[in-house]
Image (cartoon, rainbow, N blue to C red):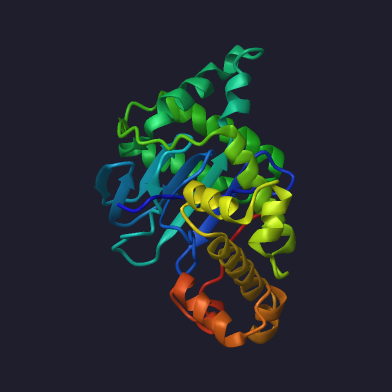
Amino acid sequence: MKKPSLEKIKPTEGSFFSLHHHKDHCLCHLDWWHFHPEFEIVYVPHGKGRRQVGHQAGVFTDGLLVLLGSNVQHYAFNFGFESEGYEEYVIQFRGEELRRLADPFPEFARVSAVLDRAQTGLSFDGGSKHRIGGMIREMVGMGSFERLLRLFEVLREMELSPETEVLGARTLLSVEPVHLRRIEQVYKIIRKEYQNDLSTRRIADELAMTDSSFCRFFKATTGKTFKEALTEARIQKACELLLNSDMPIATVASVVGFNNISLFNRMFRVLVKTTPNKYRGANRVSVET
């Protein structure tokens, strides 16, 4: 199994956490095998597929609901999906802040408890899966404050659920805080200047590193080269523009930093597995903000 990539997650603007609703042709992940410091809840309402969390593999036949702990390695759940019409709801959040709520507010003890249990991953089945999943689906139409309250309710219901499987494959990546801070700094630059011609020398200078040491560090920590990370960020932005604007494809390519339309089309196809035109024509992503 290849080394997992570190996925950089950005909370929804004005919110403590991120909530995404992905459907059908949406590119949910550019890195199938990945990890991230945030906890993650994934609800797949229907269908049959495979589940790979750490070194523990399994199957699901009537949708899926999981809660994954910080830095748990896992495949994206649309990888190996065998049914038609893939759909998922994804919630990602930092756990430290929620755990600390149990100190001044004993009412949050169950929330803290389920996060502790989820360090190696939890899977929910039976009636709990779709009952809690229904609560998650309703979050899409809520305002930010109501969403936060619902997240607390979802975590509480997960702690109370008797239909829980512990995914005990504890294959967490140990990422030093200083390394995470450096990686966050790199991705901050990428998000701000992805359309520019960013060089590894420029980034290395920002981190007070040599060019060669930065390249080795970034590859060892994220599982990809800086060029690959920059290209992925550009393609992700291109996906947003294709779905949410009427810009010509050549204009989209230029806006996200590709001066060569042929290169843009080639990289888009490599990462998204389809052409920009077909991607735009497919079902649009529903991402609530």
Query: Measured from the top left, where is residue 128 in percent x and y?
Result: 37, 36
- Near-viewer residue (140 or 215): 215
> Where 43 falls versus 172 (above or below)?
below
Name the residue located 61 percent from the left edge and 46 percent from the top edge: 183
Query: Measured from the top left, where is residue 94 in percent x and y?
Result: 59, 35
- Near-viewer residue (19 or 232): 232
- Near-viewer residue (141 or 11): 11
Name the residue located 42 percent from the left edge and 30 percent from the top edge: 118
Name the residue located 50 percent from the left edge and 81 percent from the top edge: 266
Query: Measured from the top left, where is residue 217 in percent x and y?
Result: 54, 48
Query: Measured from the top left, where is residue 177 in percent x and y?
Result: 59, 33
Looking at the rendering, which quadrant does residue 153 occupy? top right
- Near-viewer residue (282 or 276): 276
> Where 178 falls versus 29 (above or below)?
above
> Where 13 falls versus 26 (above or below)?
above
Q: In the rendered image, is residue 212 in sight?
A: yes
Would residue 38 be found to the left or right of residue 160 on screen?
A: right
Q: How many marks?
A: 0
Name the residue located 68 percent from the left edge and 74 percent from the top edge: 257
Looking at the rendering, which quadrant does residue 82 occupy? bottom left
